[in-house]
Amino acid sequence: MKRRIIGFLLALVVIAGVFVPAAPAHAETFDKGIITGESVAFRKGANKSSDLIRRLPRGTVVEILATNVNAEWHRVRCHGTEGYVNRMYVSLDPSLTAYQRTYTGEVVNCNAFVNVRKAADASSALLGTAEKGSIFTVTAANCADGWHQIDYNGKTAYISSNYLRLTAKASNTQLTSLMVTGGTMTPAFSPDEYGYVVRADADRVAITAQGNSGVKIDVNGTGKSSDTISMPAHGSKTVRIAVGGKTRYTLYIVRGALVVGTWNIKRGNGQLPMQGRLIENQQPDVMALQEVYRNTSGSMRVDNLASLRTKDMQNMSFATALTYSGGGTYGVGLLSRYEMSEPEIIKLESGSYEQRILQRVEITVDGKKVSLYNTHFSFNSAALRKKQFAAVLRAMNADENAYKILFGDFNAKASEYSQLKGYTVINTADTKYLNYAGGTIAKNEIDNIVVSNNITVLNSRMIENTFSDHKPLIAYLLLG
């Protein structure tokens, strides 16, 4: 059984990759944010019952005064008034160093002209039109979800990002622009962002990249600065972009797949805003987290799980392993696009060491019931983990649902996963993960995803980062 699993995963090596966020090792600070939701509540306090100051339209710029207040709110200043907005509807990208650049924008992807609007909204009043090929000074790149702010005859105006190709000042080793059609790309383009995820919504995804004058750009080994990728109804493809003869950027394109991930977040590690940004940029459907801390007492609530959920993954399920005498709990948690039901916590044999548990919930994907399991095994001894593996195997084998996905920090060597007979292990000793430049990532097998054999693994990736002492593992799955 083990030999079959390894052979399958070796086929994934060529297309596995990494997203590397442009961020320092220390905690990031933020100056401003952009409202990305429609009519977002701006409240006097950090809770839903607090008085409403007013509602903020998409594209509103707010000054960030404090992040993750009570786990789910940013304290902001807007037009001189201080208040709170739900952090899931605020993009912090404009505050990052990578985005502080001078851009110009060329009108593209139209027959003759595009509309120029008064606000970052397709229903906003027209200020005029812009001819194809015309170039504008971009006063705020990615100022809202899907919009750029420009100088339009001396007036502040907005053009949809679908029709404006950004060109940034960059070095000869970087791209100055990157445009994708046929899918949603995250994060927004910046020369310093080297990895991108594209959720394809069409059969073909077109990629166009540019660099400084005279610098050779090669998209996907074509020798050209553009390429069109054909996407099956269910699939995952990796596209690499070389600048000046050296691979530097990577796009991970996925269509019709269940995107899942696992990550030991080290209790947030003082990096919750950046951890949340990394997770959101992967566009997952399900994210399993280990070393999750919650403290629901006091005026400043700490909740790692709530601090990391996204607009598209708002459902949360937490499983307590430890309760601290001074307040607060510790355990594992799941975030999901799908509603979770039938929660269960199974205590695992832990000897005299820290209590370990197995979390279980159920989701329904395209009418199919899927059991999700999440755990964090003991690091103390292989003998203890053997008992934990056995307990997990019993629970999964007894599960009536046909589809099962197990996530966790298993603290285990690759050889120990042979105990999960009848299941496919994604991260094996023979699985190689590549960084954005095509180099091999140093890794072990303790962070893993295991699936029932009726689930096809389309691809998997490991993500280098400075936000935890563990690397997230992302997998693209197809339910058989």
Image (cartoon, helix red, strand yellow):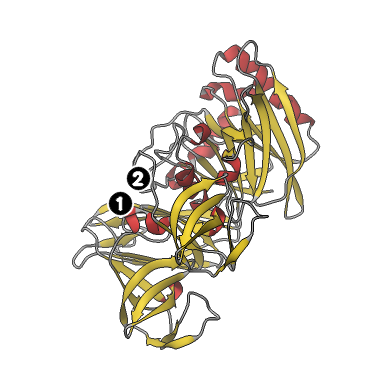
Q: Can you say whether 421 is above or below 112 in the image?
A: above
Question: In the image as oriented, which residue stretches furthest toward the top?
Answer: 352
Residue sitting nearer the eye, 268 or 284 = 268
SS for tag 2?
loop
Q: Is residue 280 visible?
A: yes
Q: Say which of 3 and 228 sits in front.
A: 228
> Can residue 421 be spotted in the picture?
no
Mark 2, other Cα within 10 Å: few <14 / some 14–19 / many ≥20: some
Query: Which residue reaches farthest right?
Result: 400
Label placed on residue 247: 1
As drawn, is 115 to the left or to the right of 375?
left
Q: Considering depth in this image, is 74 or 290 the residue closer to the camera? A: 74
How crowded is the residue under tag 1: few (<14 C-alpha within 10 Å), some, or many (20+)?
A: many
Q: Left or right: where does residue 245 sit relative to residue 133?
A: left
Mark 1: secondary structure: strand
Pointer 2 or 1: first along the chain? 1
Image coordinates for residue 48, horizontal then vertical, percent: 65, 54
- The spot of residue 381 in percent (x, y) is 56, 13
> x, y (%) of residue 468?
45, 35
Q: Is residue 70 left or right of residue 252?
A: right
In the rendered image, the vertical position of residue 165 relative to residue 394, given as above or below? below
Query: Image height check: is 189 above or below 446?
Result: below
Q: Quadrant of residue 242?
A: bottom left
What amino acid is found at the position of numbered circle 2 in the picture?
Answer: Gly
The percent position of residue 157, horizontal first and vertical second, equals: 40, 79
Q: Amino acid at mark 1?
A: Thr
What numbered label is drawn on residue 438? 2
Which of 206/210 is in front?
210
Q: Are marks 2 and 1 in contact (CB under 8 Å)?
A: yes
Q: Residue at x 67, y 25 (%)?
A: 357
